[in-house]
Amino acid sequence: MAEVLGELVVGEWAAEAGFTPSIASVVAGRSGARLFVKAAPIGTGLGEAVEAGTVLADAVGDLGPRLLRAVSCEEWRVAAYEVVDGVTVDAWNSADVDEVLRVISRMRERMQPCSIRGVWPYAQDFVPLLGDWATLGVRRPPPISAPVARLAELEARWVAVLAPGVALHHGDLRRDNIIREPDGRLRIVDWTHMWTAPGWMDLIRLLPDLASAGHDPETVLRRSCWRDTPDEDVNVALAGLAGRAWRDCALPGEPRLRSMQREQAEHLLSWLDSRLMRE
């Protein structure tokens, strides 16, 4: 990284947000020049994620940090990005909603259809993570008035609804993967998967996170460029995401992660319940 900086690296500060156990640090040289560096070995899925981010960088463009250099060092993959001045979003404010809608519109313009080769459907990769509502709902009934059988019916259509999507898909949009710059601009980080999905799916993934700060997800969806997405397709997405979150939040594991998953599950289920009550 000294070569990219143009000087000796004299300091490193590890990123505090996120849950992935790979190197993610800001490094600085003597003059104060900085880089954000991600690094991990191939073979664990982490090095592959770093590599995917470098492949996707041109398609992502200014929606994320600019890639400056990517190198391979034996089994390690290393990527150096510009440092985006700002803070990781820890709570959504009212001004963020308009900016989220702007970002989602830009994603639609840039990423549908996906311009990257070698991608595959997010829906297929997610199948092993589905909660299996037919059994999960009996073993651990969710806080929802809709019948568990309806959740299972929706979940069963996951691949049919989502696999045909042709947009480049982030797959993990939530506040710890978004940086708010001093002027309020939002930048998306951690593009780590070669995935496609319907363009609206990233928004659906993000809206329960906004709901955690009191923003009504249905209102935001109806204001977005994806307002005409079929209701049943949205319900399928919510049922699939909710099943995974509701199951995993009760498992042993890192407390911050389980807390985040519980929050996701509660807001996904609450939103889905309100939609199903209108049927």
Image: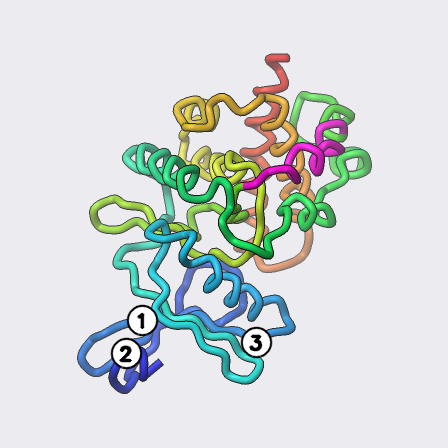
* Mark identifier at residue 5: 2
* Mark identifier at residue 41: 3
Q: Position of residue 251 (x, y in %)?
A: 68, 52
Query: Which stretch is magenta?
Result: 153-166
Residue projecting furthest to the left = 31
Give the left or right position of residue 266, taking residue 146 as reference.
left
Please state which amino acid type lies under the numbered disc 1: Leu
Q: Position of residue 250 (x, y in %)?
A: 67, 48
Q: Which residue is label 1 attached to? A: 35
Residue projecting furthest to the bottom = 8
Please state which amino acid type lies under the numbered disc 2: Leu
Q: Position of residue 151 (x, y in %)?
A: 72, 28
Quick check: marks 2 and 1 in contact, CB under 8 Å? yes
Quick check: marks 3 and 1 in contact, CB under 8 Å? no
Query: Within 10 angstroms of label 3, few (less than 14), some, or many (20 or more) residues?
Result: many
Give the left or right position of residue 270, taking residue 98 as reference.
right
Residue 158 forms part of the magenta stretch = yes
Quick check: 73 above or below 99? below
Quick check: 166 above or below 69? above
Q: Earlier in the sequence, mark 3 or mark 1?
A: 1
Q: CA distance from mark 2 to mark 3?
A: 22 Å
